[in-house]
Image: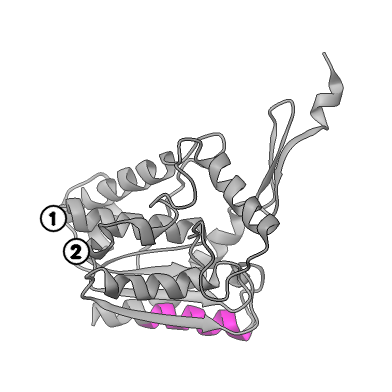
Amino acid sequence: MDSSNSTEIAHEYPPFFKIYKDGRIERFTGIEIYHNYLNSFVAEANVVAVSVEYRRAPEHPVPIAYDDSWAALKWVASHADGKGPDDWLKNHADFESLFFAGDSAGANIAHHMGLRVGLEGLAGVKLDGIVLVHSYFWGKEPIGGEDTDAEKRRKVEALWRFTCPATSGVDDPYINPGTDPKLGSLGCKRVLICIAEKDIFKDRGWYYSELLGKNGYRGVVEVMEAQGEYHVFHLTNSTCENSVAMLKRIVSFINQGQA
């Protein structure tokens, strides 16, 4: 056996993962930081949260993550009216006030789950709103002040094609909501979009807020921008002023829906 394959890199996509020629995958970040952040959020908002551990690419290519997330939501909804196997959900969750939230790829998924609720419904629950933090959206043509560097854009597109081999490209509705004719069918009445000034995806967040109104969405759209910050800064520096402010804004957004 050629032991050199264990150290030779086949594909590398920082800051997410690298793949070695022997098939081994090394991820640069894990889920502990998410668990800690979620605990802080739950304590501040006084809510019940369900964290979806969907299968991740490249081992499990997109759209498996969307399918897993929808299956998890159907499981949550199965607890409405005192049913379902989880006593904590049955006794404490408010199924009349449900929110989807996520950052980066999780925000992308939260959007698509909200859209699916609008198109298919989710029996037993009422979706009040979605929270999209630093959404992983993209597109073939640059928008706003988006980076036009061909090499940087090629890397974003290459990562997308690697995680979703069956895609038509970065104008696929999975990653570019602007190409989705069903965008206005989002199944909630409120949307909070959080962006970061120095995030490569910043302009996509602003663009998404504009697209909703242009595509017939009749709900309320709010946007919060953190000055001087980068992609998912709240995970690496959860106690900084901008992180605390964003957490409080999300908490306020959700608690407003429960009032």
Kindly identify which residue carries mark 2: 126
What segment is highlighted magenta in the picture? 241-252
Q: Is residue 88 left or right of residue 134?
A: left
Q: Residues within 10 Å of mark 1 (few under 14, many from 20)?
A: few
Disc marking residue 118: none
Q: Is residue 155 magenta?
A: no
Residue 234: in sight, yes or no?
yes
Answer yes or no: is residue 50 visible. no
Q: Main secondary structure of the magenta part?
A: helix
* Residue 210, image quadrant: bottom left
Camera-side residue of 5 and 40: 5
- SS at mark 2 in the image: loop
- Residue drawn at 38 percent across, 74 percent down: 209
Label ID, residue 81: 1
The residue positioned 23% from the left and 71% from the top of the image is 217
Q: Is residue 73 left or right of residue 199?
A: left
At x 28%, y 61%, the residue is 183
Please state, as top left, top right, bottom left or bottom right, where the N terminus lies in the image.
top right
The quarter in which the C terminus is drawn is bottom left
Residue 129: image x %, image y %? 29, 70
**Residue type, mark 1 in image:** Asp
Q: In terms of depth relative to the viewer, which is nearer, 170 or 39? A: 170
Residue 6 vertical position relative to residue 145 in the rendered view, above or below = above
Q: Could you tell me residue 128's position as x and y percent?
A: 24, 70
Mark 2: few/some/many CA within 10 Å (<14, 14-19, 20+): some
Work out how far the residue at label 1 is from the one at label 2, CA to CA, in angstroms: 13 Å
Residue 186 higher or lower than 121, as above or below: below
Q: Is residue 128 left or right of residue 38?
A: left
* Amino acid under disc 2: Lys
What is the x, y in percent for residue 258? 25, 77
Nearest to viewer (mark 1 / mark 2):
2
